Image: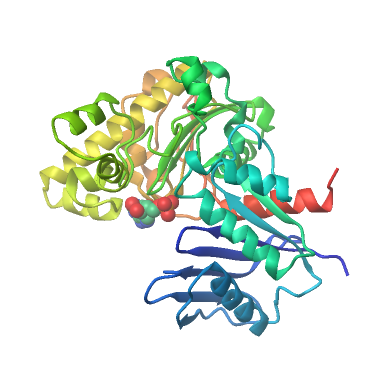
Amino acid sequence: MTATRVLVLNSGSSSVKYQLLDMRDRSRLAVGLVERIGEAGSRLKHTPLTGGGTEAREREEPMADHDAALRAVAEELSADGLGLDSPELAAIGHRVVHGGLKFTEPTVVTDEVLKEIQRLVPVAPLHNPANITGIRTAQALRPDLPQVAVFDTAFHTTMPESAARYAMDVATADQHRVRRYGFHGTSHAYVSRATAELLGKAPEDVNVIVLHLGNGASASAVRGGRCVDTSMGLTPLEGLVMGTRSGDMDPAVIFHLVRVGEMGIDEIDDLLNKKSGLVGLCGDNDMREIRRRIDEGDERAALAFDIYIHRLKKYIGAYYAVLGRVDAVVFTAGVGENAAPVREAAVAGLEELGLAVDGELNSVRSDEARLISPEYARVAVAVVPTDEELEIANQTYALVSDPA
Ligand code: AMP
């Protein structure tokens, strides 16, 4: 029997999201989420998608660590006849947030690889430790199976130095590995390729601006399938206005808050990562709620929306200039896929650049990749649902089924 299943694990500090896929038809066999690992009220939500049953099962029980969480996941999968001991399982694919400069491709995990991911912890202190834990736990469960790391940063390693370097002292930057790495790379890779497909062209033949607008948000400029710039930097804090992150600001704001505001570094880190962006501006980070408040005449929500759109527009303009010729601007992730008013406002007034949105097409709700620009527009505007898990599974399976 050939092994055709891939388990995708996305391990956070207190959570694990997972999907089991059959790569013959890329169908999902089961999906689930474990939350509050190591905290009170740990719970697992598991949804089998085969055998007629698609009802989610939930269990709430103490799960002290990722090991306990993954064992619970394995039990649920076994109950559906999809156990991790199955010979049909080909590999486990792991999302790893930071791969630095070294990891430009999906990589089979070895001790050396784990050491390198560990070495990158100082530049990804919130994410890489959890990813390492997830890999170690999965290795313990199936030591014989290839574990594949798929890096959020990998797609952006093609950025030229002119885009990747900050204008600061080179020796200091290099000593501390300070540069722009970019994130959400799996999504930018998947969506830029799917956009080329939607246009009926090869990825090498199109230039695309990808706007990944979820709770975290980033833009990228992709020339002929290769990333040439992206809005997130050393960490996911740089760039667009996000749900709770500030995005771009004068770095001297931090000196000011230390010196004049007498705030501590951790406090400012928390402020800019968790209490800024839309939530800092208006108290809400959910675009649905913000739109509802705007419809009721709420001025704070309206200003938050305007600031969000202003920044987005600046990035569209910047990446237009970086690319020179743009074939498509594409919206993806929670806000990008669902919030028609965001898409309309982001492109409004850019007709001179060949950009326009057709009101009717834009208001259609769908899970399919689709064009929302009028036929006459020079540049296509598209909505392409992202699928990071499928991309991780594809890359994992491609590596283990054709290791050359
Ligand atoms: P993500 O991080 O990609 O899961 O995106 C989550 C965000 O998408 C939420 O915080 C909302 O702001 C936004 N979102 C999800 N569904 C909708 C919707 N129907 N309309 C507007 N925004 C939405």
Residue at 42%, 16% in the rendered image: 168
Label count reads 0
Quadrant of image for the N terminus: bottom right
Q: Is residue 191 shown left or right of residue 106?
A: left
Snapshot quadrant of residue 336: top left
Rendered residue at 38%/33% (across/down): 238
Q: Is residue 84 visible?
A: yes
Between residue 361 and residue 336, name the one nearer to us: 336
- Please, is residue 390 above or below residue 199 in the view? below
From what the image shows, is residue 90 above or below residue 299? Answer: below
Q: For residue 343, which quarter of the picture?
A: top left
Q: Position of residue 198 (x, y in %)?
A: 60, 40
Residue located 66% across and 26% down the image = 205
Q: Which of the 4 image quadrants contains residue 211?
A: top left
Residue 266 in picture, x, y percent from top left: 29, 44
Can residue 108 be seen in this snapshot? no
As rendered, which of 248 and 234 lies closer to the eye? 234
Q: Nearer the viewer, residue 99 or 88?
A: 99
Measuring 59% from the left and 40% from the top, which residue is drawn there?
99
Tell whether 250 sits left or right of 160.
Answer: left
As drawn, the residue found furthest toward the bottom would be: 79
Q: Residue 375: x percent and y percent?
A: 49, 32
Residue 384 lies, in percent from the top left, at 52, 45
